[in-house]
Structures are given as structure tokens and as C-alpha cells.
Image (cartoon, rainbow, N blue to C red):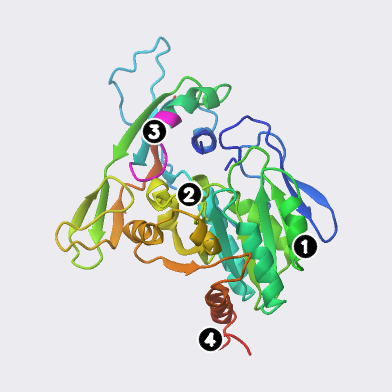
Amino acid sequence: MHELGITRSIVAICEEQAEGRRVEVVRLEIGRLSGVMPDAIRFCFDLVAEGTAVEGATLEIEEVRGLGRCRVCKQEVALEAPFGTCQNCDGRDIECVAGQELRIREMEVV
Amino acid sequence: MCGTCGCGNDAAVTLTSMQSGAQQALRVGHVHSHDHDHDHHHDHDHGHAHAHAHAHDHDHDHTHAAASRTVVLEQEILAKNAALAQWNQGWLAGRGVRALNLVSSPGAGKTALLERTLRDLGGQPPIHVIEGDQATLNDAQRIRAAGARVVQINTGSGCHLEADMVARALQELEPEQGSLVLIENVGNLVCPALFDLGEEAKVAILSVTEGEDKPLKYPHMFQAADYVVLNKIDLLPYLDYDKQAVLDNLAAVNPRARVFEVSATKGDGLEAWYAWLHEIVAVGSGQPQGAPA
């Protein structure tokens, strides 16, 4: 349950960047291979935002699919887990190129 | 970065030096971040937070007619920890010190491996230890008895170490050139995978009394760990354990991982582990490679 700590970081970063304004929307990008569960972030968000400039804000999460590239034959591989097998050469040495995002993209403030 | 991940707001984090016995609070209660006193680490992560005002009429019809603005952040959520980990890395490199981050489930034998390593190597290379546990000084006492300088970090309700805690521990330990810092993380195969500490490598300790499918169940950790110590192999004759299965599972998750098969209590297989420790210290301090005589 590292999501509570991570949600606190999100709220802290947004509050700092809001510079006194009220935050209405927070937009995150969370990769499916990041080890962070969007539902758990949603669950924590309202609770953590309470009493801050982010209180009441809408949380929008864009999930990013996992994508890897075979280190041997350079073939792209769709990843459901942070590891996989190359369909082209059966290689298992896959470099993860997408899906590990854990980023605050933007927010809307008033 | 808040270390209280999961359980309540009042997780005080403390650091105890086993040399002086002094205890300091790293975080008191619910701190949201920025209590690290490295003023030379500037987070320039949002210089471009240009609030470009989109003329904005899509469905924000609140009663107050204030126009909302989009502030582009594009900020990594774990950026603070990552920046501090980098700072630790520089601090260590500047002193010719190498650090390893030891991770495992509780009970896999991290502390036993450290104790044995300290006793067998007898100060060559010099080893310093950072112990992470939610509570107690028990592990630090064991390490001190085995002859190393050690600090204990108690994370309260936190389930992993973070880079700022390690920064403080390093300042307390003052490791000398050519030494090795072994960081025993909180026993947990989930969260420590996400928080770099500035280490050279993560070393996962996996014992043969655990399931063969652990690498598949905790792929984030076994992906992050390029070295794996398979511990308690002296128990294999008494267990219904398929060692090849765990090696295959590990290879599926991380084909680059190097495996050391050892028994920390009986001593089997430790030569290869020690040779590797000598090797990384030699590389870190610019000495020629290989174990000293």
C-alpha cells in the first residue's frame, strides 16, 4: 500500500504548484507496469486532499499500456507484466519502453 | 516524499546510531516532504509551470464564474526521491564508496547473511550497515555484535526506506574510501522496488523455504534486482523444493540477474558472494579488480 504515500506526494506537488489557487482537476499518467494501482490512488485521493488546496478536485487518470522492446531482435512486445517473451525470437530479455509512467501531467486551477 | 505509505498520519521515522546511541527524528508525524536539508539539491522540476490560460468554456459552469487555467506540470511523482537518490549516488561516488540495497521478504535471511559476511570478511573491505525496520533496534544490535558500524532506521508505519533517510544515515556513518555500505531494507518485496536509494545495485535475497514462484508474484522487485542471493540451500535435502523452477522463474522475469546460491548459516556458496563484493569495491575505489590476498 505505497499508494497512500504516493498520493500524498501528488497532493503536495499540486498544492505547491498551485501557489495559493484552488485546484479543480488533477491529471495523472500511470503506467500499467508502474507498480501503482490507479484505484488505490483514487481511493486515497479525496482523503489526502482534505484541508488542502486540492480538496474537492477531480482526479483524472490516464493509464498507459505496457510496451517492451526485445533487446535481441528489437521487436516491440506488448507487456501485461513487467516481463515477457518476444513473439519474434522467443527472447526474454525485454526492455520496458512504456507502461512505467508515474507522472502528474497537468492540473486546472482557479 | 512521505514515508508513511499505507498506515496513518503519525509515523515518526527515527535514526539511531549504534556507535553513540544517539537517536534523531528524521520525520515527525505527518510530514509531506521537503524536510531534507540538502540545500545543494535543487529540484528544478517545474521551472516551466507556465500557466498558459486556455480560454476555457468547456463545462466548468460553477456558480462562481472564475475561469480555470491549466498548469502543465509533467512532473514525475517520485522525482523528489529520485533526485535524492542521485544525490546519494554522487556522495558515494565522490568518496569511492559502494552501496548495495538488500531487499527480501521478512525472514529470508538478510540479517543472517550480513552477520556471516561481516564475520567472514573481518573488515576487508570495511563494511558499514544501514538497517531498516519498522521498529526495534534488534537487527542493528546483531550487526554491531558482528563488528560493523551500523545505524538503525525505524520507519514507524512506513514499509520501505527512502533516499532522504539513507542520506542522513550516510552522514552519520561517514564511510571511508574503499568501503562498502550494505543497506538492509524493510522486509517487503513490494514498495522498496519503487524507491531507489542511490545504490549500485539491488540484491534480492530469496530463501528456499519460500515458494518457487516468488519472482513471478513480485516481478517488479525481481526486475529491479540484478543480483539474487538464493539462501538456506543447506535445507534443500529436507524440503520439497524445485530449485530449477525458481531459477527458471527468475530468468523469465529478469534474464540478466546473477544468482548466488548460499547458506548464510552453514557457509555454503559464500565464496562467490564475497568475491563479488570485493570486485564491486575494487571498481568503486579505482583499485585493480579482484579480491585482495
Is label 1 on the same chain as label 4? yes
Measure how far apart labels 1 and 4 are at the Cα level.
29 Å
Q: Amino acid at mark 3?
A: Pro
Using the image as rendered, state which of residue B245 and residue A85 is in the foreground.
B245
Residue that badge 2 annotates: B194
Please state, as top left, top right, bottom left or bottom right, where the C terminus of chain B lies in the image. Answer: bottom right
The magenta stretch is A32-40
Q: Are marks 2 and 1 in contact (CB under 8 Å)?
A: no
Measure how far apart labels 3 and 4 are at the Cα level.
46 Å
Residue that badge 3 annotates: A38
> Considering only vertical position in the picture, is B210 above or below B267?
above
Q: Which mark is residue B144?
A: 1
Q: Main secondary structure of the magenta part?
A: loop
Q: Chain of mark 4?
A: B
Q: Amino acid at mark 2?
A: Leu
Side of B105 relative to A61 (left or right): right
